[in-house]
Image: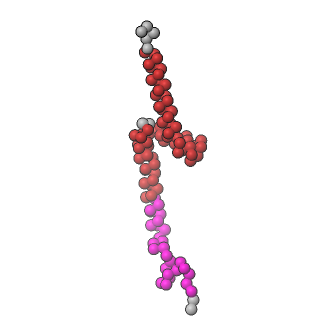
Amino acid sequence: MSTQAATERVDGSDDVPDARPGRWARYEVVYLAIQQAENHLLVPQIMQRAVNLHPVAVVLSILVGASLLGIAGALVAVPVAAALAVALDELRAARASAAHVSVFK
């Protein structure tokens, strides 16, 4: 009596229920399309509302952070960009109030 391999069933088929390559390729294409749409359309909109930055600024900050520091740079890019935006807003407000303050009170 011969022994069968662990990955082979009694009827001769393997353990993979549907191993047609075309079907898996379609799933992969759909998954990649959904992932790209989420990363390029949805995430910048959410970040804009969360940190009050323009979506283009979010995407550019992630690209710059990733190119400079890799994955870690991409992770900290949006908070750094938001901090810079707040600092620039405060600087503009300080300059505007200094320009409008009268010397003669």
- In the rendered image of this protein, does residue 105 appear above or below residue 63? above
Question: Does residue 3 appear to the left or right of 51 in the view shown?
Answer: right
Q: Position of residue 28 (x, y in %)?
A: 47, 60
Residue placed farthest to the bottom in the image?
A: 1
Question: Does residue 103 appear to the left or right of 73 in the view shown?
Answer: left
Screen quadrant of the N terminus = bottom right
**Is residue 69 or residue 26 the one in the foreground?**
69
Instruction: Check the image and tell me how it is coloured.
Output: secondary structure
**Is residue 93 or residue 43 the one in the foreground?**
93
Q: Is residue 90 located in the magenta-colored stretch of the structure? A: no
| Span colored in magenta | 3-29
Q: Position of residue 36 (x, y in %)?
A: 46, 51
Q: Is residue 8 located in the magenta-colored stretch of the structure? A: yes
Question: In the rendered image, is residue 41 in sight?
Answer: no
Q: Position of residue 59 (x, y in %)?
A: 48, 41
- In the rendered image of this protein, does residue 98 appear above or below residue 40? above
Residue placed farthest to the front in the image?
A: 105
Tell me which secondary structure the magenta stretch mostly adopts.
loop
> Would you identify the image quadrant in which residue 54 lies?
top left
**Residue at (45, 67) in percent of width and height:** 23
- In the rendered image of this protein, does residue 58 appear above or below residue 22? above
> Would you identify the image quadrant in which residue 69 lies?
top right
